[in-house]
Amino acid sequence: MILEIKDLYVSVEDNMILQGVNLTVKGGETHAIMGPNGTGKSTLAQICMGHPKYKIESGDILLDGISIKDKAVDERSRMGVFLAMQNPTEVPGVTNFDFVKAAIQTRMAEGEHLRVGKFILKFEEASKNLQMGKGLAHRFLNQGFSGGEKKRNEILQMKLLNPKVAFLDEIDSGLDVDALRIVGENVTKLKSDDLGLVLITHYQRLLDHIVPDVVHVMINGKIVKTGGREIISKIDSQGYDWVKTELGITDFDQRKVPVSLGTCPTKSLK
Ligand code: ADP
Ligand code: MG
């Protein structure tokens, strides 16, 4: 597996949020993306999954050498892209179990059928490992789930969908210490040479449980620093000001640039 994000410029409602992101994630690697609020981390995850709210102004996203930027969300999912959302959506009327079952069914080749008995066992085992209450399977998707239940449920889906590249967007938010450990253990068990992991987080505590190989700092829609785990503790104790100082990033840069004035190379100034 190789995911390549190439010089990506992304806008939302005419504001350029991502301003030239480059990132390569290979199977077996775990990357952490850290950065202040509003800096474009979720935008990056959402655009890779194909959220229609975000628009690619230029650049490309390639999975195993194939551009996915014009592919529909379901197609990306079939190709192996997965996103554990920062704020999982509540879907009244669809049970959790039926949702995951349908997601797996639609990814099967024509003529192949889901063996429901086997699937139930896998679902039960995954929920047990995540220490989720049995009743959650038959409740409506995320409706009335606690923050922690929603996040565990995202990992449950990941386990069953078996992606090639997974973005976990603030999977630690809303988790207490025990839940964090359980989620961490479950995600770590999923690590393999066939899976690329991208963890988006603010906190060292997640990265103590799911240890990254590479750490990136995103500021103002750009990855401005890449390094090893030493970056994590420095951010934990000192925040992001040292990165800004080191790189000469000013508050002026923080203003989101309207698309018409963007630095995107394919957009000319109006
Ligand atoms: P992060 O995940 O790093 O906190 P986001 O990717 O969620 O940041 O947001 C990046 C920026 O995009 C923020 O400034 C946010 O206000 C802006 N943004 C997100 N959604 C919209 C929207 N629908 N309309 C306008 N701006 C948006
Ligand atoms: Mg976010």
Image: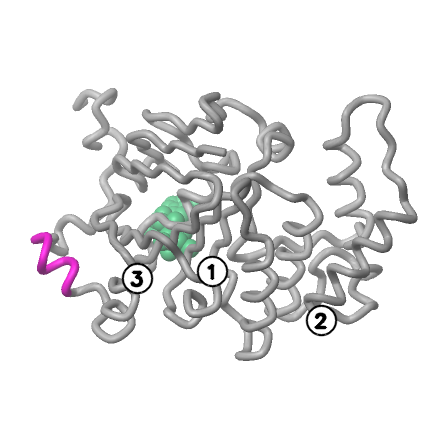
The residue under label 1 is 170
On the image, the x and y values in percent for residue 241 come to 16, 65
Q: Nearer the viewer, residue 167 or 228?
A: 228
**C-alpha distance separating marks 3 and 1:** 18 Å
Residue 14 picture location, percent across and down: 33, 35
Residue at the (75%, 39%) spot, across then down: 104
Q: Nearer the viewer, residue 80 or 70?
A: 80
Task: Work out how far the residue at label 2 is from the one at label 1, CA to CA, in angstroms.
Answer: 20 Å
Residue 88 relative to residue 245: left or right: right
| Amino acid type at mark 2 | Gln
Mark 3 secondary-structure assignment: loop
Q: Disc 3 or disc 1, which is closer to the eye?
A: 3
Q: Residue furthest front?
A: 193
Residue at 50% from the left image edge and 53% from the top image edge: 168
CB at mark 1 closer than 8 A to ligand 2?
yes
Which numbered circle lies on residue 229? Answer: 3
The answer to which quarter of the image holds residue 21 is top left
Q: Amino acid at mark 3?
A: Arg
Range shown magenta: 242-248
Decide whether the magenta segment is chiefly helix, strand or loop: helix
